[in-house]
Amino acid sequence: DAKTTQPNSMESNEEEPVHLPCNHSTISGTDYIHWYRQLPSQGPEYVIHGLTSNVNNRMASLAIAEDRKSSTLILHRATLRDAAVYYCILRGGNAGGTSYGKLTFGQGTILTVHP
Amino acid sequence: DGGITQSPKYLFRKEGQNVTLSCEQNLNHDAMYWYRQDPGQGLRLIYYSQIVNDFQKGDIAEGYSVSREKKESFPLTVTSAQKNPTAFYLCASKRSELNTEAFFGQGTRLTVV
């Protein structure tokens, strides 16, 4: 499985932008980049995903490097409710392959937001 | 409302007993997943199922068993063979397509005493 690497933790101040990096140097051409976040004592929730182009939604933006070996989740104005663990995962594989359908999470980045 | 439900939220069992955790979804999703999370750690995949009557081992399947007799249900049994069963267990479901999101339940916190 292609692996992702994220910093263990990051800090931000409220109302400032946050850029959460993710490296995935072994990404394959069919891998989608997904981001989830997990609030304390809850299940993860979907944030955003992309393949090649940058993506925006109401929660965040996803910037994908041209070579696709890295990506950045951007929270435009952090709030206290954005304090969570953020996971960057790859979703891919060939249909019928042994890892197709597998959904693997890493350690994620713990984001702390200061008032 | 559509969603994925795990029950119970908290579960206590004595050491040596098997225990089954429930996961039900009414989202018509083909794929379902079970994860384990220990304090301060990420999610580790136990088992996953892409379709009814079929499932695959994840990264830490030893000491666990699952069944997928119905599309809506994917129960996880923590057997007495699992050395450290106390953990937070999360179930998820999603459509099969690669570019679709997974939906998670609220989790079951299992404590074995």
Image (spheres, helix red, strand yellow):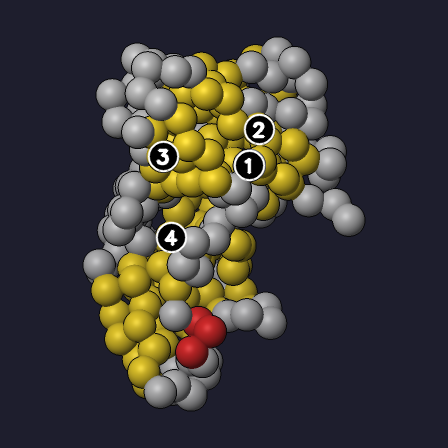
Residue drawn at (42%, 88%), measured in percent from left and top? A15
Distance (Cα) linking label 4 and label 3: 29 Å
Distance (Cα) linking label 4 and label 1: 29 Å
Answer yes or no: do the residues labelled 2 and 1 have beta carbons within 8 Å?
yes
Amino acid type for the residue under numbered disc 2: Ser
Distance (Cα) linking label 3 and label 1: 12 Å
Q: Nearer the viewer, mark 2 or mark 3?
A: 3
Amino acid type for the residue under numbered disc 4: Cys
Label 4: which residue?
A88
Amino acid type for the residue under numbered disc 1: Pro
Label 2: which residue?
B22
Distance (Cα) linking label 2 and label 1: 7 Å
Whole-percent x, y for residue B73 in the image: 64, 25
Q: Secondary structure at mark 2?
A: strand
Q: Quadrant of the C terminus of chain B?
A: top left
Decide which of tag 2 and tag 3 comes sooner along the chain.
Answer: 2
Whole-percent x, y for residue B92 in the image: 54, 38
Q: Secondary structure at mark 4?
A: strand
Q: Secondary structure at mark 1?
A: loop
Distance (Cα) linking label 4 and label 2: 27 Å
Could you tell whether A47 is left or right of B15 in the image? right
Decide which of tag 3 and tag 1 comes sooner along the chain.
Answer: 1
- Identify the chain of the residue marked 2, using the numbered disc in the image: B
Label 1: which residue?
B8
Q: Which disc, if any, is residue B111?
A: 3
Q: Secondary structure at mark 3?
A: strand
Which of the 4 image quarters holds residue B35?
Answer: top left
Whole-percent x, y for residue B28 in the image: 73, 33
